[in-house]
Image (cartoon, rainbow, N blue to C red):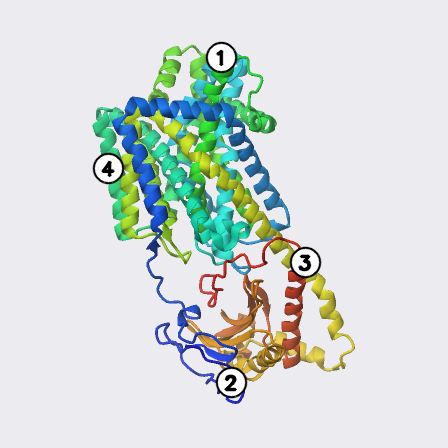
């Protein structure tokens, strides 16, 4: 039911000495002006998050599609192998340029966003700050997008590029200098830009606009309410298919890598039995995680993995050919920086051997770009979760640089160590690495000091990364196939278990068709649909950020009218004393509630009733604040399809500074800050007179109208939240 406006029955003032009440026993919000569902307590006193429901069309179509591919590959192995090869060949010939252009555009897009004015926008409310310190955040960035496959390619790719480069002759000085650079290119900035793009989209729409944590949310600026129909479903299906096959590629490579490591340690056979055991083990761990909900250790686990990996890199550098490795590292950095623009757009259009080049592109660049694309929703979701509170500039710069610095060290040191061995004449090592890439990394470790210990250590690190990928992949896929209305929600436990089993089965089937090669081919094919979605996400995100820039510009433009509105007002010779008194006051609970009752509420009520008299839909609500003894006031001016204007006075508790405690009423004081839809504006209105408070409301209202005027020529409306409920209680920051 609603509590309608009643001009003749004003609400009685609440007692300023009431006790803190629990969320379950909190009183209903008091509607002062307008109407509001008084039974909707969770808006102002959020309760438990209910379990999400499956998105059955997305779930069923995605599951059936993946099952169909898996069964087809299992019962028609040779035909499936030939079909995947044919389709991949066609893509390499006709759409290779599309993958390359997409990756390049993504790099340019995230850099433009980061270093434009939009870079100051936070992934969350304006007042939010990062949850994790820099080292923890950096460690989780590393753990999110780097898996066991890094061990696989750190040796295999540099050796392969030296022996069989895309152009020119192999086993030359030029091939040796470019071998590690190609590996850095495939594992470098381009892929992490795709991660950053998806992370920005997830973080912006979920944590700033309060929309569901789903891919379709990023398309709202383009198609509006149709994201809830077949178009949104098709986008989610494309994301699920790409993610599942991307994860299957990583798990497939990881299985092959770890199987050989276990063979060296325990002497186990490298056949189907051990591979199946590893996959079943990973699925079992993911199932236990789903049942128990254990996810608190990811920060600590990430930090341990980073420290172990850095320790391994330092050990190889110190105990190996130190001078040569450092010389090669410096050279690799220079070559990568100078070659990156050309490599990014290189399609080898004038190759002397088009067929060989096409095969190389399919096996390397196109596979990596499709792989990065497939992993982008998966990793982007995780990056958004750990980056809430950071600005877009901090986020992009961190994602593009921090993990890549480690990759640079890892690839250069291990890759150049392997190359030195090959260049010195160890052709057996080179040929074996090309024929069985999973053996190259371990063969290199065997010949180092303490090789046995290094093998055990690397296998342990790889196993942890493998399990983490399987567990996280099941979680993200369950989220993509569920109707999630709150960013704190995750897919149902049974859904996570289902996807863990299905991904494991797909991985095993793909490995039996033709090993890693088949997994690579399937990734290229399945990554193509989501490549199109990436463009849609960039268009939608760009439009939303343009609206943000208009809102920021409107603040400065409306300042002139705000200052003019105050000119000519009767001067108060004592105004400076009142200002000084306000700055030196640290209001207690009683004083804060008294101010809200006697000054703030009448002021906002006067504005609200005047707007109502002019025919403008306006609501003013007073409500409790969870776990605080001071109330909030929430004024909303409803503007139809456009973005509503909001003026929320919200209390924040802080300890009284030590230098003022002798004159304060308690240990804590309360700031009455102004919030809008995107968080705190950062200032305290306690002590404002009625006229000053009304002036402040009107200043911000005029600013909002200026914003609506500035964006009028853009297509669609100014509300990009799909009508999502605004945050009522700011409990997370």
Task: State the residue position of label 2.
Answer: 6
- Callout in the foreground (1, 2): 2
Q: Compute the Cα span from label 1 to label 2.
A: 85 Å
User: Residue 710 — which label?
Assistant: 3
* Mark 2 in CB contact with mark 4 (< 8 angstroms): no
Q: Compute the Cα span from label 3 to label 2.
A: 36 Å
Q: Earlier in the sequence, mark 3 or mark 2?
A: 2
Task: State the residue position of label 4.
Answer: 280
* Mark 3 in CB contact with mark 4 (< 8 angstroms): no
Q: Earlier in the sequence, mark 3 or mark 4?
A: 4
Quadrant position of residue 556: bottom right
Q: Earlier in the sequence, mark 4 or mark 1?
A: 1
Q: Compute the Cα span from label 3 to label 1.
A: 59 Å
Disc 2 secondary structure class: loop
Disc 3 secondary structure class: helix
**574 versus 248 height, above or below:** below
Q: Earlier in the sequence, mark 3 or mark 1?
A: 1
Q: Quick one: label 2, few (<14), some, or many (20+) residues within 10 Å? A: few
Quadrant position of residue 539: top right
Q: Compute the Cα span from label 2 to label 4.
A: 65 Å
Q: Measuring 23% from the left and 24% from the top, which residue is drawn there?
A: 271
Q: Quick one: label 3, few (<14), some, or many (20+) residues within 10 Å? A: some
Task: State the residue position of label 1.
Answer: 170
For the N terminus, the quadrant is bottom left
* Mark 4 in CB contact with mark 1 (< 8 angstroms): no
Residue 586: x %, y % from top left: 55, 75
**712 versus 193 height, above or below:** below
Do we see residue 319 in this rendering?
no
- Callout in the foreground (2, 4): 2
Q: Quick one: label 4, few (<14), some, or many (20+) residues within 10 Å? A: some
Disc 4 secondary structure class: helix
């Amino acid at each position: 039911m609603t509590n309608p406006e009643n001009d003749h029955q004003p609400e009685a003032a609440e007692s300023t000495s009431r006790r803190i009440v629990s969320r379950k026993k909190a009183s209903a919000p008091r509607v002062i002006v307008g109407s509001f569902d008084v039974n909707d307590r969770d808006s102002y006193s959020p309760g438990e998050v209910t379990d999400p429901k499956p998105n059955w069309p997305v779930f069923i179509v995605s599951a059936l599609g993946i099952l169909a591919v898996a069964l087809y590959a299992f019962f028609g192995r040779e035909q499936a192998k030939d079909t995947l090869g044919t389709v991949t060949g066609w893509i390499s010939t006709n759409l290779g340029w599309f993958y390359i252009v997409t990756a390049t555009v993504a790099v340019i897009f995230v850099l433009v966003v980061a270093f434009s004015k939009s870079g100051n926008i936070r992934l969350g409310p304006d007042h939010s700050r990062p949850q994790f310190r820099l080292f923890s955040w950096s460690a989780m960035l590393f753990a999110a997008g780097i898996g066991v496959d890094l061990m696989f390619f750190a040796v295999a790719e540099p050796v392969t590029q030296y022996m069989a480069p895309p152009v020119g002759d192999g086993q030359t000085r030029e091939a040796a200098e470019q071998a590690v650079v190609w590996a850095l290119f495939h594992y470098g900035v381009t892929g992490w830009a795709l991660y950053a793009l998806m992370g920005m989209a997830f973080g912006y729409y979920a944590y700033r606009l309060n929309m569901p944590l789903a891919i379709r949310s990023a398309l709202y600026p383009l198609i509006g309410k149709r994201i809830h129909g077949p178009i949104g479903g098709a986008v989610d299906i494309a994301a699920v298919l790409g993610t599942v096959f991307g994860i299957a590629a990583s798990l497939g490579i990881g299985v092959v890598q770890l199987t050989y490591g276990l063979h060296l340690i325990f002497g186990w056979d490298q056949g189907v039995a051990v591979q199946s055991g590893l996959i079943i083990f990973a699925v079992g761990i993911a199932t236990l995680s789903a049942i128990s909900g254990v996810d608190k250790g990811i920060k600590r686990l990430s930090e341990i993995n980073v420290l172990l990996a850095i320790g391994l890199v330092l050990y190889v550098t110190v105990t190996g050919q130190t001078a040569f490795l450092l010389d090669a590292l410096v050279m690799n950095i220079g070559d990568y920086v100078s070659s990156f623009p050309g490599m990014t757009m290189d399609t080898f259009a004038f190759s002397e051997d088009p067929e060989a080049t096409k095969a190389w592109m399919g096996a390397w660049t196109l596979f990596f770009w499709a792989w990065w694309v497939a992993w982008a929703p998966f990793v982007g979701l995780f990056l958004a979760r750990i980056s809430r509170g950071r600005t877009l500039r901090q986020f992009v710069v961190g994602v593009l640089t921090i993990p890549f610095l480690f990759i640079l060290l890892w690839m250069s040191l291990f890759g150049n160590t392997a190359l030195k061995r090959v260049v010195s004449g160890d052709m057996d090592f080179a040929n074996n690495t090309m024929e069985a890439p999973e053996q190259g990394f371990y063969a290199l470790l065997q010949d180092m000091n303490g090789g046995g210990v290094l093998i055990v250590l690397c296998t342990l690190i790889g196993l942890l990364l493998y399990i983490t990928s399987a567990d996280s992949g099941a979680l993200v896929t369950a989220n993509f196939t569920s109707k999630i209305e709150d960013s704190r929600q995750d897919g149902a436990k049974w859904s996570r278990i289902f996807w863990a089993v299905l991904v494991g089965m797909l991985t095993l089937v793909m490995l039996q068709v033709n090993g890693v090669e088949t997994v690579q081919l399937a990734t290229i094919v399945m990554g193509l649909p989501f490549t199109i979605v990436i463009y849609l996400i960039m268009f939608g995100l760009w439009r939303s950020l343009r609206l943000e820039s208009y809102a920021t510009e409107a603040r400065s433009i409306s300042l002139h009218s705000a200052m003019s509105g105050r000119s000519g007002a009767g001067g108060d010779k004592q105004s400076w004393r009142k200002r000084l008194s306000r700055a030196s006051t640290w209001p207690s609970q009683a004083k804060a509630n008294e101010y809200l009752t006697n000054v703030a509420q009448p002021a906002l009520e006067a504005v609200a009733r005047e707007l109502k008299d002019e025919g403008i839909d306006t609501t003013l609500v007073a409500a409790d604040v969870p776990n605080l003894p001071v109330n909030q006031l929430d004024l909303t001016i409803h503007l139809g399809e456009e973005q509503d204007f909001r003026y929320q006075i919200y209390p924040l508790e802080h300890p009284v500074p030590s230098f003022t405690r002798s004159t304060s009423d308690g240990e804590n004081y309360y700031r009455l800050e102004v919030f809008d839809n995107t968080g705190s504006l950062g200032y305290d209105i306690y002590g404002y007179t009625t006229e000053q408070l009304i002036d402040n409301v009107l200043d911000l209202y005029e600013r909002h109208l200026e914003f609506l005027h500035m964006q009028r020529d853009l297509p669609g409306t100014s509300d990009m939240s799909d009508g999502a409920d605004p945050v009522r209680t700011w409990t997370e920051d």
